[in-house]
């Protein structure tokens, strides 16, 4: 299917559910921390050999960075669309199962601030 070439911006992110995406989402949940490949493998139940290869590919894309054996997300490597996509997913995962997640109409009872401002 053809696309409008000027407005088309492909995602730099790995596909949902892949090891690369799982690693990025984990690192995005902890942007201030660095993890060893072994720690990532254990936390995400990914084979240790796959983690190293995947981190190398993510580094080539500019999505992760490392110091010695510790790897972290590279926030500077994201454009706004990609950063919001990975960040929103990480936030959603972090708060999954909380009151707001289990009550999708939680905002229905909020005051309409614009309407109140117009009444003054």
Image (spheres, rainbow, N blue to C red):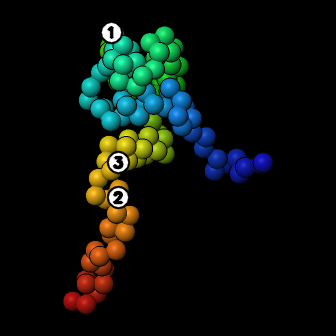
Categorize mark 2 by other alpha carbons within 10 Å: few (<14), some (14-19), many (20+): few
Label pair 3/2, CB-CB below 8 angstroms: no
| Residue 68 image point, x, y percent | 32, 9
Residue 68: assigned label? 1
For the residues carrying marks 3 and 1, which lies nearer the camera in this image? Answer: 3
Q: Is residue 60 above or below residue 108?
A: above
Give the labeled residue for mark 3: 96
Compare marks 1 and 2 and give the one earlier in the sequence.
1
29 lies left or right of 17: left
Label pair 1/2, CB-CB below 8 angstroms: no
Q: Is residue 62 visible?
A: yes
Could you say which quadrant of the image residue 119 lies in?
A: bottom left
Compare marks 3 and 1 and give the one earlier in the sequence.
1
Q: Is residue 96 above or below residue 19?
A: below
Q: Nearer the viewer, residue 98 or 58?
A: 98
Residue 102: assigned label? 2
Categorize mark 1 by other alpha carbons within 10 Å: few (<14), some (14-19), many (20+): few
Q: Is residue 112 above or below residue 10?
A: below
Which residue shows up at 40% across the image and 18% down it? Answer: 41
Could you say which quadrant of the image residue 73 lies in?
A: top left
Q: CA distance from mark 1 to mark 2?
A: 41 Å
Which residue shows up at 43% across the image and 27% down it? Answer: 23
């Amino acid at each position: 299917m053809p696309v409008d070439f000027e407005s088309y911006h492909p995602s730099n992110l790995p596909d949902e559910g892949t090891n690369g995406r799982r690693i990025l989402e984990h690192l995005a949940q902890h942007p201030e921390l660095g993890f060893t490949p072994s720690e990532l493998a254990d936390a995400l139940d990914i084979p240790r050999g796959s983690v190293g290869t995947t981190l190398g590919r993510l580094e080539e894309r500019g999505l992760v960075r490392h110091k010695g054996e510790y790897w972290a997300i590279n926030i500077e490597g994201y454009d706004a669309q990609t950063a919001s996509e990975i960040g929103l997913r990480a936030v959603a995962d972090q708060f999954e199962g909380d009151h707001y997640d289990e009550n999708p109409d939680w905002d229905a009872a909020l005051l309409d601030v614009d309407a109140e401002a117009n009444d003054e």
